[in-house]
Amino acid sequence: MRSPRVIGAMVVCLCAALSPLAGLSAGAPAGAAAKPVLTMALATPPTSLDPLVGSGGVNGVFQAPAYQGLLHLEGNGGSLGPSLAASFKWIGSNNSKFQIVLHPGLKFADGTPLNSAAVKTFAEAFAAGTSPFAYVGQEVQSIATPNDLTDVFTLKAPDLSFPTLLADDETGLGNIVSPQAITEKADLQASSDGAGPYELSQANTVQGSTYTFTPNPNYFDKGAVKYAEVIIRVIADPNTALAAIESGQVQVAYGTPDTARQARSVGVGVASFPGSVDALFITDDLGQLTPALKNVDVRKAINYAIDRKAIAKAITLGTGSPTDQMPIPGSLGYLASLANSYPYNLAKAKRLMAQAGYAHGLTLTITVPSFMSQLANLDQVLTTELAKIGITLQSYSGATFPAFIALENSGKYEGVIFSFPFPKGLPSTVPLLYSPNAVGNPRHEILPDVLPAAQAAEGIGGTKGATAWQAINKTIVSEALEVPIEIEPTIYFYAKSVHGVPQSLTIDPDFMSPSK
Amino acid sequence: MGIAERAKPETDPGDAAPLASDAGSRGAQRGLLRALLRRPASLLSLIWLSAVVVLALGAGVIAPYGSADEDLLHTLSGPSSNHLLGTDNLGRDILSRLMFGGRVTLAGVLIATLTALVLGSVIGLLAGYLRVAIDSVLSAIADILMSIPVLVVLLSVAAVTSRNTTVLMLTVGVLFSASVFRIFRAATLEVRQELFVTAARTSGLGDLAILRRHILPRLGSLLIIQGAIVASVTLVIQVGLGFLSIDARPPAPSWGNMVATASQTISTTIWPLIPPAVVIGLTVLAFSAIGDVAQQSRTGRGRPVGLGGSMRLVPPPVADDLGAAGEGSTRPTDPAASLLSIRALSVSVPASASARLTLVQGISFDVGPGEVVGLVGESGAGKSITARTILGIVAEGAEVSGSIRFKDTELLGLPEKELAKFRGTEIAFVGQDPAVSLSPTHRIGAQIAEIVRFHRGVTRAEARALALDLLDQVRIPDPKAAARLYPHQISGGMAQRVVIALALAGDPKMLIADEPTTALDVSVQMQILGLLKGLQKERSLGMLIVTHDWGVVADVCDRAVVMYAGQVVEDASVADIFERPLHPYSSALRSADPHLQSVGERLRVIEGQVPAPGTWPSGCRFAERCAKAVEACRAAPVELESRGPARLVRCIRAGELDMDADD
Amino acid sequence: MIRLIARRLLVSVPLLGVVSFVTFVLVSLTPGNAAYTVLGASATKAQIASLSRQMGLNKPLVVQYGTWLGHALQGDLGRSLITGQPVTQALGQQLGPTLSLVLLSLLVTAVGGVLLGVWSAVRGGRLARVIDSVSFVGIAVPSFILAIILISLFVLKVHAFPASGYVPISQSPLEWIRSLILPVVALSFGGVGIVAKQTRAAMEDVLAREFVVVMRANGYPRRSIVYRHALKAAAVRVLSVLGVTFVGLLTGAVLIESIFSIPGLGSLAVQASAQSDIPLVIGVTVTFTLLVVGANLLLDIAYMALNPQIIHR
């Protein structure tokens, strides 16, 4: 799960010299050879710096500098390329055996060799760990190490998206941790031990507010380490974050539609990518908490009661667009015919409520990540709009990512408002929302209409696969399992000294060490 | 932030002290209400608060929109005819949200304030009244509560109760009850000390009855003051909680979360921040203004004399009731030969916005070099004011006319800076109550050395030596030890010696002593008088002694100037006036002097009181109390007339009466 | 004097006890479970139960508190549930910014408030009215609203100050000051008004006293009367206002630090409370209380230095 406002998520290449202030404030030595400092601003601290405990979402940004994946996902939902692994391929034809071959001579930051055994140790530890994405690791049946550089993953079931999981974004399965740290149970909250270009500088890190990374001396591609320091600061207020860019304190920060106008007017770089879907995810589709939600009419009523057009205009200030489905146009599973499946229709919504026997309304409790201001606003709008059909929305907000995750995963709420970037479409959406242990499925529901079909689709490629995913999408929309609302652009602000507009929404090591 | 306002309850002046002087109980409270309604600041505040409350309560009916009515197509609009105060980021009407939001915010304030008041006042009352062992425990608890960082604790409470506003504001109330407790405890103690409670106690009233009848009514106005103060503080806290989004659940509005919402969009427009900020500000102000006015009406604090201000020299009043000009001409002594020469001196102060009050009217007298003049009279005669006016020390806004010549210089009308040059070096001053005449926070030696150094321009070391020398001159044993003491460590008599030493620091030619012995024990009085007289002789100082004590006049003075109701009524040598007072008032004063009365005789006093300034009759001002007054006395103003050499009297019957005869 | 300090310290012991215990009870009532927070989202019930036992979470509250207290007395406040960092270390890291912010604000409040208060008491008239209005505005505008307005004006409109963050004084004294100017202004503005008002009242009372008349009548220079004698006599009351103001500043710092993204104890408190990071919440609360205790102690000493009646009896 990933916040679109997470900034680290961008490919930035710092070509020109940084502004003098930033250089000064970071204490970088003067001179032509001196490497600049990259400072980024995020709205929230991570739940953990330890990939084995907390991965995904905001965590990925904080882990990206110190950890690197086996593979590398290029561009915006683009193709896979080599990274720590020099080559990779499926073995056989049923998409359940995947082989990678490592670069020779790799080392972790602690000096331990990064070989096939180390990869195996990590992957098994990840599957056994408590990361919300541990279920991804559990897809692996076994790992063979035919030689020192080769790992062969055997999956429990075919899954075409498995290679993506080995890339250093998304789930954390790519963030290989040193076996020494794993066996010695090193404190990876306070230190780092990966094969990434940087390592956490404990002395200059203030947990919860400033995270400083310095170059990893054992990194295999020294030329790619472009910065003397990478600093991630937590700045909750979007206005403050923008001002920090203007004043040169920060080079990259997340943006909001509210602040984007101001950013443009003062000449701060604004990069905007279409791509994440703001939605009210219903986590109690089986109605175990609130029986009404089991009734498809109630779920449809909710969908009909929402004025998506007005919301898209107000919340994204016209930069977004309304949507009724989870995949964005062009991604796997997207079906143009599903557009406008739930036009705003209060009368119909009320009728459906009455039909379901809830003319007098009901109460739903949901969680909201209030550190994302648009979602907090969306929550308010939904509360007002649903009140019109008698639904009282009670929201519990998490002011930081850890607080939000704690609420969300408690399984006590019937829904959650969140925003997912799904550039690759349903193959990444469905596992996240419907796998029994997925972070997006806190009540561990098993939806019979979705899960088996998705598991089947994971093993199919090509046009056939695409059709299968579209069928799943149709099911999700027609059963109103979720309440997609709008496609919102992901906005980044960057200082003029930073070149290379973000190419990808994923956490990509490119911006720290472009290895190509 | 405003929470620092907790300062107010524990430190505001007159927390408890004025209670003692609060005579009536219910009457005082009605007075308080009247004061609140009369002063524009508090009246406006009351109006504002009522309006806010009415708008909040009536929001459902009055508000143009619902609190959560969104107009997603018109977000962040400025004021318009549709939305008087514009709309917020979701197109909601700011005015309506302020009204609805007031409910949450004001309810929170109400809960916190009531909790603090009830807890604090009841426990404070009991602790103060019962004075039992638990008192110290309670005070310790109050100390603890007041040391707790409010917001940090509230954050924990918020986490536990998932932002239950009621519980949060109850917590705030409990925390703030500590300061209310302190005030009420102190106030109750004060009242309890008072005689009538003791009397009530001995008369057999039970504790409860005493509390109900005597103590509670007096603490009522304190409740209003504390309520206003606590409300103004808790409002800020409540809004702060709202800002951290731990009060109302959005989209339900509160003033605090409106600020938070507005802060999201300040880079686009600052407008949505303005209405809530103004409403919050005005409401805080209204509470604190009410508290202030209530406080002032209790303590009756006006602008004190203090450093005093610039006095204004005005032309003498047109010879209306008393011919000021005429008096000068009747002066027998030669002003040129005097050290100090006062002519037709009048002093008035502002009594209200429009009216002025004359305190001293047309005073004239002289003090010759080496001469000791006593300025005699009962209190209210204007003696002290006359004495202080000579040094240019008058109340703010005072107007002075006439002439005060010292040697060759006209002091009246001199700018403060010039006048200051005379103080201490030419004319020095010894005050009434030595216990409060010295700077309480500095050692005696240092105080004297400071002024020595200033007047004489010597080095620090020399100044210290000179200070010791001065202390020795005023016959303080072991000056070295004395110099190291603080004023509160020495006796009244010693303090007066120190004040005299201090007055002599600038080697003055003249000394003004304002009732120098009144506050002292009788035995010490004699010593101080002796000291003054000795020093006066040694240095041949001109001296003006203000006194009501005929004995002092007899002991040290050469001349006596008798004052009554702002006027000089008799001016004569001490020998003359003792032998044969010409004014009935002088005569009465002399007779009333306990020193001169023989044992066994009934103590004679002058019946009646000096008429207060502003109530002076147009005829003889003493006539009301004068046994010898006739109709003519009251008919017209009486002139000061010469009666023999160096003798002036203001009495139309001065020639015909024998004062010693009892009529 | 020693007795007074001893008394203050004696009061502090139950104070710290009460505060830590109350916080302990409060946060242990918070929904969620510490073991759960440590283990992360997909921990199994068995894992949680085992860690809970390990952490002693299944023991009675009083026992848990006793254990905590025992460790606390040895300087061990436990570890953050989220970051695993020792609480004392986190507190140590974030104490500097808070102290810088609060102490600078206290300085501004004290100097500004006292000067304004003295001027208004001494001069009266129009100046007093102007100062009154300033204090009124200071009281009326809560610090966090002022902070937002300041950011909007001086950061977003005129780029006069950095928007956020904190530069340690050891790194660059100039940047340290620059990073603190707006927060300090926002935090101390209200306090200046209150202190000015109280100072004025105290000064007016003192200036009305007889010793002022005597000093003035004997030629003491005005400056000396006002600043050396009257102010010192009024100082005790002013000090007690400052003491309470300090507590207020600490509270205000919580909001101001959050708004300006200053990595201090205040933002730590907000974050820890939002994340139910129990050991950290308790640690922050205890630290805040310790600061108050320390301030009160300093205040007592200052009282004694300023008020000879306490020591020289």
Image (cartoon, coloured by chain):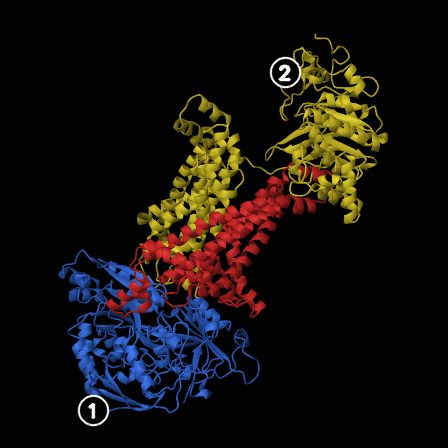
Chain colours: A blue, B yellow, C red
Please say whether residue B72 is visible from this viewpoint. no
User: Which residue is at a point 33% across and 46% down the rendered structure image?
Assistant: B58
Please state the horizontal and vertical placement of residue B524, each as a whole percent of the image. Answer: 71, 27
Looking at the image, residue C261 sits to the left or right of residue A315; the answer is: right
User: Which residue is at a point 53% across and 30% down the rendered structure image?
Assistant: B21
Q: Output the chain of dot 1.
A: A
Numbered label tally: 2
Quadrant of the image occupied by residue B516:
top right
Amino acid on which disc 1 is placed: Ser
Contact check, label 1 and label 2, Cβ < 8 Å: no
Please say whether residue A225 is visible from this viewpoint. yes
Please state the horizontal and vertical placement of residue C251, each as a whole percent of the image. Answer: 46, 55
Does residue C65 lie above or below B185 as drawn? below
Amino acid on which disc 2 is placed: Glu
Mark nearer the viewer, 1 or 2: 1
User: Which residue is at a point 44% across and 80% down the rendered structure image?
Assistant: A198
Label 1: which residue?
A93
Looking at the image, residue B384 sits to the left or right of residue A226; the answer is: right
Quadrant of the image occupied by residue B352:
top right
Quadrant of the image occupied by residue A453:
bottom left
Label 2: which residue?
B607
Do the residues indicated by labels 1 and 2 lie within the same chain of the protein?
no
Q: Nearer the viewer, residue C190 or A381?
A: C190
Give the CA separation, mark 1 to mark 2: 127 Å
Q: Output the chain of dot 2.
A: B
Please state the horizontal and vertical placement of residue B180, each as a whole percent of the image. Answer: 44, 41
How crowded pointer 1 is (Cα within 10 Å; few <14, some 14-19, many 20+) is rated as few
Please state the horizontal and vertical placement of residue B462, each as a whole percent of the image. Answer: 79, 46
Residue furthest to the top in view is B663
Identify the element where label 2 is drawn.
Answer: loop
Looking at the image, residue B85 sits to the left or right of residue B494; the answer is: left
Q: Nearer the viewer, residue B306 or C279?
A: C279
